[in-house]
Image: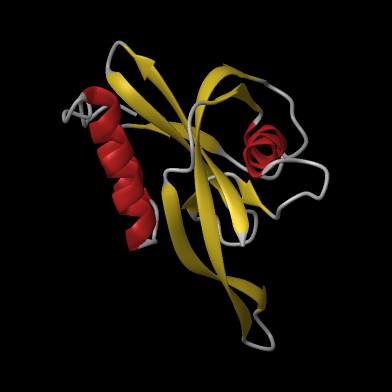
Amino acid sequence: MQLAALCWNEGKDGTKILLITSRDTGRWVLPKGWPMADRSHADAALTEAWEEAGVTGTVDGPPLGRYSYDKVLSREADLSLRCDVEVYPLRVAKLARKYPEHRQRQRKWFSPEKAARKVDEPELQQLILAFAARETGGASGTDGQS
């Protein structure tokens, strides 16, 4: 199991979702990582958001749900591991210019609809859209601006 942060904020254009690129494939993903022995799951998700996206903020609620994906361990050996990911909502207070992985990843704000289209996993697409609908009472903001 891994833990992820759905980093979001509310702006004049509605709810926005922050995605980052993965280091190996460049796909758009949520910041995520493994549980940490000395931290709650929510705190571990917050730590991953800092390390991978430079996010500081607050986990604002229980997990939104889970999604699954195949983590590639070795392309040469065609070896992968099925991972379940527990997703925590994280309201972004600030984005740092420099953070541990700032030279290894890109980050970008998207409307919920566009963020859902950018990620590969269908279960994650649904989590993003359901979260946005909950935050806005059914309307998830505008779709052209990112």
Q: Image quadrant for the C terminus?
A: top left
* Nearer-the-camera pick, 6 or 42: 42
Q: Is residue 34 above or below residue 107?
A: below
Question: Which colour scheme appears in the figure?
Answer: secondary structure
Left or right? Give the position of 106 relative to 133.
right
Task: Inspect this view and state whether residue 113 appears.
Answer: yes
Give the residue displayed 36% in from the left and 50% down from the top. Answer: 118
Residue that protrudes farthest toward the bottom in the picture: 77
Q: How many marks?
A: 0
Q: Image quadrant for the N terminus?
A: bottom right
Residue that protrudes farthest toward the top in the picture: 12
* Nearer-the-camera pick, 79 or 128: 128
Give the residue displayed 68% in from the left and 21% down from the top. Answer: 97
Q: Specify the quadrant of the image occupied by residue 9.
A: top left
Give the image location of residue 32, x and y in percent. 61, 49
Give the residue displayed 25% in from the left and 40% down from the top. Answer: 113
Residue that protrudes farthest toward the left in the picture: 138
Give the image location of residue 35, x and y in percent. 71, 52
Q: Is residue 73 above or below residue 57?
A: below
Task: Inspect this view and state whether residue 114 appears.
Answer: no
Give the residue displayed 24% in from the left and 24% down from the top. Answer: 136
Give the image location of residue 79, x and y in percent. 65, 84
Residue that protrudes farthest toward the right in the picture: 38
Give the image location of residue 3, x and y in percent. 60, 50
Q: Is residue 37 above or below residue 91?
A: below
